[in-house]
Image (spheres, grey):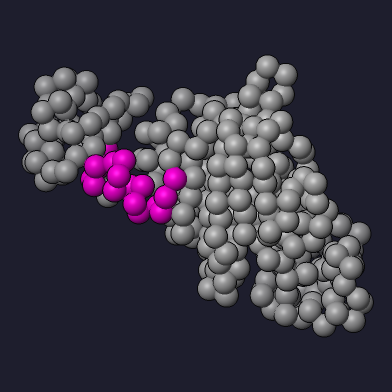
Amino acid sequence: MLKARGLTKRYGDAEVVRGLDLDVERGECFGLLGPNGAGKTTTLRLLLGLIEPDAGHIELAGIEVPRRAREARMKVGVVPQMDNLDPDFSVRENLLAYGRYFGMSKAAVTARVPELLEFAGLASKADAQIAQLSGGMKRRLTLARALVHDPDILFLDEPTTGLDPQARHLIWQGLRRLIGAGKTIVLTTHFMDEAERLTDRLAILDHGRVVAEGAPRALIETHIEPAVVEVFGEGLADWTARHAAGLCQRFETVGETLFCYTRSPDTVIEALGNAPALRYLHRPSNLEDVFLKLTGRDLRD
């Protein structure tokens, strides 16, 4: 459904995307992750034909981009980071107007609206104004709007940013239904648990390059020890100096917390029993650990 080869984009002296290769298969949910400034937004704009690459080749839904970008975008649904619903229209009218942009007849889009409202859980809000909707409702409407023309592939740019846990889970339920129905999805997110739950495969981007690619669980098993013990409290520096190198396969101190990556968490926890001033959290390793190992913990602006 999506193929990019040697994708490169420069702005002045800055090479924002550097020889990027991507493949997204039909029916899979593919994640594109990376810290701020990694090149995700530029990559999405390139893939959608909104900007031209300096080098490389793109095929979107089997159509060459950017040469035939307008044609390709007729097969694409997009959920942007920020809701751009029309505040002058009701919920129903937002769907009707958007369908007409894709050349759908009034009868065709009118017939599709009830299904989309049901999918978004907004059937009772069909005639409500946008200002009356909660943040979660707006995101669900934006997702439903992206589906109005039954696209072959969906681009979701941080679809749950700013939502409370209940709203996030409702969005996830809707996305799982789409994945189960065989829709192809390209998802960007800063929530590692979201990527781990939803994506079949993902690529981690940093400084315009793919630094890792694969299924979430495979990436965790490849890059990170199976368990993490986070240690914090009074006397941490002394305990770290005396024990960390011998007990942890790998460790790092961030602020006032020691992250001990280990294959033998019980041994670490037993040693901590002799340090009552220290507290700890024992958990399995996850995708966030992979992300931070590969892209670093430094704050990006």
Q: Is residue 24 above or below residue 4?
A: below
User: Could you say which is closer to the camera, residue 140 or residue 72?
Assistant: 72
User: Could you say which is closer to the camera, residue 75 or residue 126?
Assistant: 75
Q: Residue at x 29, y 48 (%)?
A: 221
Q: Is residue 249 left or right of residue 77?
A: left
Q: Is residue 91 left or right of residue 137?
A: right
Rendered image quadrant of residue 249: top left
Q: Which residues are magenta?
A: 213-232
Q: Residue at x 79, y 50 (%)?
A: 69
Q: In the rendered image, is residue 138 in sight?
A: no
Q: Is residue 87 above or below residue 95?
A: above
Residue 217 x %, y % = 35, 54
Circle count: 0
Q: In the rendered image, is residue 217 in sight?
A: yes
Residue 226 located within the stretch drawn in magenta: yes
> Quarter of the image containing the C terminus?
top right
Residue 160 x %, y % = 60, 54
Q: Residue at x 72, y 24 (%)?
A: 11
Residue lying furthest top: 13
Residue 34 located within the stretch drawn in magenta: no
Q: Is residue 288 left or right of residue 247?
A: right
Residue 143 x %, y % = 69, 63
> Quarter of the image containing the N terminus?
bottom right
User: Could you say which is closer to the camera, residue 172 or residue 9?
Assistant: 9
User: Could you say which is closer to the camera, residue 132 or residue 15?
Assistant: 15
Rendered image quadrant of residue 175: bottom right
Residue 17 x %, y % = 61, 32
